[in-house]
Image (spheres, rainbow, N blue to C red):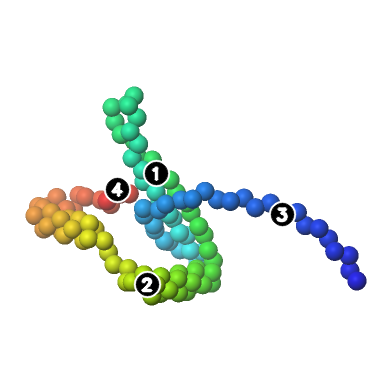
Amino acid sequence: MPEKKKINMSIIEGDSFFSHETSINFSPTQFIFDFRNITPRIDPRSPEATLVLKHNVVMLEPYHAKQFLSLLSNVIKKYESDFGKIDRPESLKKLQKKIKNQKSAEDPAEKQFKSQSYFG
């Protein structure tokens, strides 16, 4: 009978992280999930607010990204069967309508100079 070897294992727990925004990009060999958290910080010593932007990046090879998609789909189906359909919150629907109304009122010449940013 082969001799049993003892293996020491150390597990490092990650910090909890709430993501307000997520982007997903890919290369030929991996999918890159970029989870972002944007938090305003107010320091009484400074007249201006500070935005703190944290990133947690997860990289998966394509096969594992597809397995993740399947797992997430199954978990969402189970969640919805237990708790009901996940729908966009009313506050976000109102915000989307407000933004749509503002965009339709803007001058078309000004639209070409606006660019996307982390903040909207």
- In the image, what residue type sits under mark 3? Met
Q: Residue furthest top?
A: 45
Residue wearing tag 1? 53
Residues at marks 1 and 4, CA–CA distance in whole angstroms: 10 Å
| Label 3 secondary element | loop
Residues at marks 3 and 1, CA–CA distance in whole angstroms: 33 Å
Residue wearing tag 4? 119
Q: Nearest to the eye among marks 4 and 3: give it.
A: 3
Q: Is residue 1 left or right of residue 96?
A: right
Mark 3: few/some/many CA within 10 Å (<14, 14-19, 20+):
few
Report x, y in % for residue 18: 42, 52
- In the image, what residue type sits under mark 1? Leu
- In the image, what residue type sits under mark 2? Glu
Q: Which mark is residue 9?
A: 3
| Label 4 secondary element | loop
Pointer 3 or 1: first along the chain: 3
